[in-house]
Image: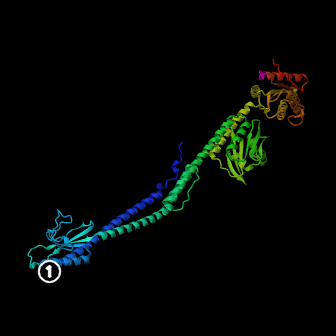
Amino acid sequence: MSNPHADFRPLPWHQRLSVRLGAGVVLVLVAALALAGAWIGRQEHRRFEEQHREHAAQVSRMVARALSERMLAGGGAGVWRDVTQVSRELQAAVGARRILVLARDGRVKASTDASLEGHRFVRATDPECIDCHGAEMRRFPSSVIRGEGGDRLLRVVGAIEKQPACSRCHVETEAFRGMIAIDFDLSGPEEAARDRERLLLAIGAAAAAGMSLLLFFLLRALVHAPVGDLSRSARELGAGNLASRIAVRRDDELGRLTGEFNRMAGRIQGQVDRIETGRREMELLYNLVVEVSQNLEVAQVRGAVLKVLGERMPFRRLLFCVETADGTWSTEVRDASAGDQVFSGVGDLGEILAGAGAGIEAALPGVPPPLVREACEARRAVRAAVGATHFLVLPFEHRGRLAGIVVASHAAQAQPPDEALLDNLSVHIGLALDNALNFTQSITDGLTGLANKRHGFVRLEEALYLARRHGVPVSLLMVDIDHFKKVNDTHGHLAGDAVLKAVAARIRDDCRTGDLVVRYGGEEFMVVLPHTPAASLAELGERLRLGVARLPVPLPGGESSLEVTVSIGAAACGAGTETPESLIARADEALYAAKRAGRNRVVVAPPQDQS
């Protein structure tokens, strides 16, 4: 699998923005210096050429005067010797390589180079000829030619203008009598140009180096560092660190870009937090629905709700008080420091929680009564801090009545649940309580609060199935109130109901947590005893019998009481073919045996025939 953060690997130095910008600026600087050097060289060459044109014009005038003077003085061959001598003197004065005095047809009449005297320049055969002879009076061109040693020479040609005195002997109408060509050595200027170029190159290199160094520090401080911070923070953001931010140090383009990046990162973090909160809330609701859907009894639903809230919410202490089907209430406490506990009380839960503080303290110890009353009156969640403890009070309804309340507390401020989540929790828990109460009512005897016969039969079937599957013992007690018909006939049915409720409560109190007490019918009760062998039946039955008979049962009105006893028949599950009907029948036979033996006693049925 490819690395999702591979694009954030460190860049090679030549790919960095600061290096590219610096290199671009340096190249532009070098190009500008090169162009400036070329332009300066060209201007120097033009000045050099103009200067030597002026020298050529001056020499031409001087030669023309000397020639005119010598011609007027007598002429002859000596004239050209004198002109040659003048040319040599002028050669040293103007710094020329050589000076040539030419006739109009290109023939050299006088020269500082004796080898060229008498030579005639012809364009077709002489590369040094610039084709200026035979022309009318004009500005003659200059050109660069090669000397005998291959060195470069600048040849400047000027006209020998016709002097007024020349008309005494010459009747031609030409404006000039000849030309003067002066060759200047270019090695000096060219060497100077090369020195200048080297100087410019050195200056350019030093400037480029200085500029590069300056650009490096400027780009590092102004561009590279902010861009690096942005890249690093983007990498951290992509890796999951949504709290990554960048310090804004300047109010420029990159500073504003950094600010926008921080705002974007904040919005992303907010969106992710909201998504994560929604995911946690959906997970909480899902787990809550799954847990409560697996439990149908009120106590089981209460335990499932506390389990989910304790695992999924950051609370230190949870209390869940719920109304039960027999007109009582029960509270379960989950405390991280003090442990768990369950307790119950008698009375209408709505009236208790809306009343005085003593009732609220009994049902919800440690919870401020005003918060409970406010939540119950408004039928909505209430959040408040009392001292250093933060409370969340969430009430639930069942068919328009207060059916339960959850109180969560924490010593420090936890992330408060969203209002929508609280509403959803209230709806789901209220619905679970509604279902549990309906189920509990359907399996509960209305008078005694015990399981009814149908539910008892189902639980007995489950116990026998587990006994066969896992090889664990299971036993059964059938309990009958002695002379109960006489109680009804003598004291009335209300007294009979009081006796039934008292006996049911005493049997339930003396049974273990896993035992099931069932009102089987009339004055008869059934007790299902999982994990109970036959050897323990006599002792357990005797404990229940004594528990019922230990105190008289108060009759309605409180003026009298009645001694009550019970007869008990016990049977243990025998062969693997034992059924609920056969086990009940064996326990009933033992019960009848107890009654025949004089009542108020326990009889254990003999083991089932294994054949």
Q: Residue furthest right?
A: 598
In the rendered image, residue 335, in percent from the top left (x then y), is placed at 75, 46
Q: State left or right for residue 331 relative to residue 74.
A: right
Q: Residue at x 45, y 60 (%)?
A: 22
Q: Residues within 10 Å of mark 1 (few under 14, many from 20)?
A: some
Find residue 611 and report its image quarter.
top right
Q: Residue furthest top?
A: 611
Q: Residue at x 40, y 66 (%)?
A: 204
| Residue 577: in magenta span | yes
Give the number of callouts: 1
* Helix, strand or loop for the magenta stretch, by majority: loop
Write the start and end of the magenta stretch as one range.
575-581
In the rendered image, residue 588, in percent from the top left (x then y), is placed at 83, 23
Say if residue 64 shows up in the picture: no
Q: Residue at x 77, y 32 (%)?
A: 446
| Residue 516: in magenta span | no
Say if residue 57 shows up in the picture: yes
Task: Check disc 1 and give the amino acid type.
Answer: Arg
Q: Which residue is mark 1?
A: 70
Quadrant including the N terminus: top right
Q: Residue furthest front?
A: 115
Q: State left or right for residue 458 relative to residue 274.
A: right
